[in-house]
Image: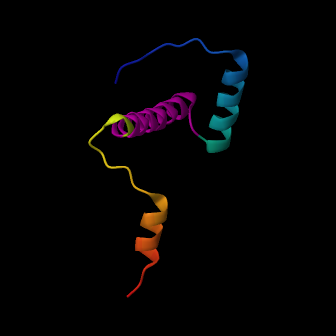
Amino acid sequence: MSQITARVPRPVVEALDAAAAQLRRSRAQVVREALERYLEDYDDLAVALERLRDPTDPVLDWDEVRRDLLDTD
C-alpha cells in the first residue's frame, strides 16, 4: 500500500477523529473508506456527464415513459 500526506484544517481533523472514534476505526481507515466512496461517486458522475453529452444517447420523454410503465394490458 502507498502512503500519502495531506494538510487539512483542524476542524476537519476533529471531525475525522470523532467519526473514527464513533466507528471504532482508525483515522487511516476512515480516510481510506471516504476516499474510496468519493472516487466511486466521481466515476459515476463522470459516466453520467459523458452520457449527457453524448448526442447519440436518446432523450426520453418522462410522460411517455410513465405512460408505458403504467399501461397494463
Q: Position of residue 55 (x, y in %)?
A: 30, 38
Viewer-side residue, 52 vs 17: 52
Q: Position of residue 15 (x, y in %)?
A: 70, 29
What is the quadrant of residue 49 in the picture?
Answer: top left
Viewer-side residue, 46 vs 22: 46
Q: How is the image coloured?
A: rainbow
Q: Main secondary structure of the magenta part?
A: helix
Quarter of the rendering occupied by the C terminus: bottom left
In the displayed structure image, the side of residue 64 where residue 23 appears, left or right: right
Q: Position of residue 42 (x, y in %)?
A: 44, 33
What is the quadrant of residue 71 in the picture?
Answer: bottom left
Count up the numbered dots.
Answer: 0
Quarter of the rendering occupied by the N terminus: top left
What is the quadrant of residue 11 in the picture?
Answer: top right
Work out whether 38 lies above or below 69. above
Q: Residue furthest left?
A: 56
Q: Is residue 72 magenta?
A: no
Q: Is residue 33 magenta?
A: yes
Query: Which residue occupies 26% across, 42% down?
Result: 56
Work out whether 38 lies above or below 7. below
In the displayed structure image, the side of residue 9 where residue 48 appears, left or right: left
Query: Which residue occupies 62% across, 43% down?
Result: 23
Q: Residue furthest bottom?
A: 73
In the displayed structure image, the side of residue 28 where residue 72 appears, left or right: left
Work out whether 60 lies above or below 41. below
Q: Tell me the magenta residue range.
A: 25-51
Query: Which residue occupies 45% across, 38% down?
Result: 41
